[in-house]
Amino acid sequence: MAATNDIQYKFPEGFWWGSAASATQTEGAADIDGKGQNIWDYWYEVEPNRFFNGVGPDKTSQFYYKYKEDIKLMKEIGHNSFRMSISWSRLIPNGNGEVNPKAVEFYNNVINELIDNGIEPFVGLFHFDMPMEMQKIGGWESREVVDAYEAYATTCFELFGDRVKKWFTHNEPIVPVEGGYLYDFHYPNVVDFGKAVQVAFNTILSSAKAIKAYRELNQDGKIGIVLNLTPSYPRSKNPADVKASIICDAFFNRSFLDPSVKGEFPEELVQILKAEGFMPQYEAEDLEVIKNNTIDLLGVNYYQPRRVKAKENLPNPEAPFMPERYFDYYVMAGRKMNPHRGWEIYEKGIYDILINLKENYGNIECYISENGMGVEGEEKFRDENGIIQDDYRIEFIEEHLKWVHRAIQEGSNVKGYHLWTFMDNWSWTNAYKNRYGFVSVNLDKDGERTIKKSGQWFKTVSANNGF
Ligand code: BGP
């Protein structure tokens, strides 16, 4: 362990060190103990070929069975906090109605085990996993589903809120909009911008309703949302490029950030939706609910930047409407790459997000809820002692943490850093392709766990509260 006087980047007392994961990506046990199907279980059943190597959500990393062992490992590598999510279709198999007692038992056990090990549970209510019965009646397109979600959220607060003091209504809510309704990488694989807007609006409304329900219960915790705030950098200062980046930002960041923090929608976006004829349907009181129920705490997910320029070509008027009618992406020459995932690495992006929150969003309390480096074929880095030598991940985390540290020096209200993810897990259509964990999961050996070099390193960082 580094001597304390060797620490160059010291973080504030009580900084949250940990990682994040989600229910459907880790639990497995997809069809036992009363769990209902969600869209992933269903989609895998009907189109297994859409998943990398045909691996589905049925087994994943078996957290359902191995949670005690996993939580022990979390403690061992220095976690003082961990974000998990509750599977809506495990807790309430039909999405609305009967609560599954086996699920209550499981989540109680996990939450208690975390607390007994000195790890604060941060709990998300929705991480991409719509119950199939709810999807059948329209998913987030439907007001009925918004109401069912509010009831589900209330049930969670009532069941677990005595111990859980940090709640998140949604994780990256723009992703089910993109995946399910624009770009065909989540079920229901609809390509329809009008529906996408309705889904986005209803998701925001559901978040505000859950926040309202939480406050009405007078529990003494905090409630927020986790957003992937990918900055949109313009190619140049040319006004056309800058305008393109502002519009891109309004579509993909401010669409959820502004209503969540300020209770209002970005004017640039509303203007476009009106001009293009895509305003969602809503009731007048919805806007009041959104306005009056903003978040306490913001989770920030950051992986890579967006690089944007003015559109080069006229769009095909026959093609479905897409946000990209207003901008093009471009590849910046000289960008730094994660060659194992094909994503750009731009560490300063994390600082830019935090400074933006400080300057334009009232310096809302926030934390880095996901950041991480996916590596395809990571087994090749396993050494003769069986340890994955992931020095690239250590460097990735360090370089991002330096910028987080700098933002703190400049007054950012950022309270913690969680890696995506604790252990290698099943990542939607990418299944087990890209590995992100502090802990490796060997699928050929019944999910055997081994702490990677980065996990050992993180333990020291957490113990020293810096590096
Ligand atoms: C984030 C999601 C996670 C996870 C991660 C890695 O956006 O919140 O659920 O899947 O991306 O993605 P991938 O495995 O596609 O590299």
Image (spheres, rainbow, N blue to C red):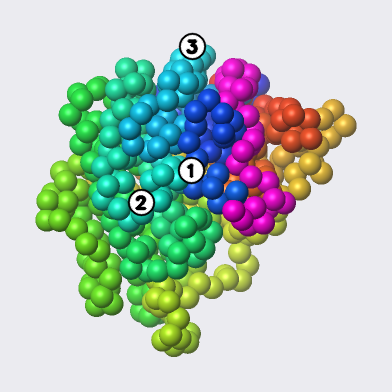
Quadrant where the C terminus is found in the figure: top right
Judge depth for marks 2 and 1 and give the one in front.
2
Who's the residue at 60% across and 33% down the image?
28
The tag earlier along the polypeptide, 2 or 1, is 1
Q: Can residue 231 be seen in this view?
A: no
Residue 77: numbered disc: none
> Which residue is at the front of the view, 48 or 70?
48
The tag earlier along the polypeptide, 2 or 3, is 3
Who's the residue at 45% across and 68% down the image?
191
Question: Was residue 70 drawn as part of the magenta stretch in this picture?
Answer: yes
Highlighted range, magenta: 46-75
Q: Mark 2 points at which residue?
A: 137
Q: What element carries label 2?
A: loop
Task: State if disc 1 and disc 2 touch (CB < 8 Å).
Answer: no
Q: Mark 3 points at which residue?
A: 116
Q: In this rendering, would 256 be left or right of 37?
A: left
Q: Mark 1 points at which residue?
A: 38
Judge depth for marks 2 and 3 and give the one in front.
2
Per the model, the C-alpha gap separating discs 2 and 3 is 40 Å
The amino acid marked with disc number 3 is Asp
Quadrant where the N terminus is found in the figure: top right
Quadrant assignment, res 224: top left
Question: Was residue 320 drawn as part of the magenta stretch in this picture?
Answer: no
Q: Where is residue 229 in the image (x, y as percent from the top left)?
A: 41, 53
Q: What element carries label 1?
A: loop
The amino acid marked with disc number 2 is Ile
Q: In this rendering, would 211 be left or right of 129?
A: left
Q: In this view, does 227 lie above or below 267?
A: above
The tag earlier along the polypeptide, 1 or 3, is 1
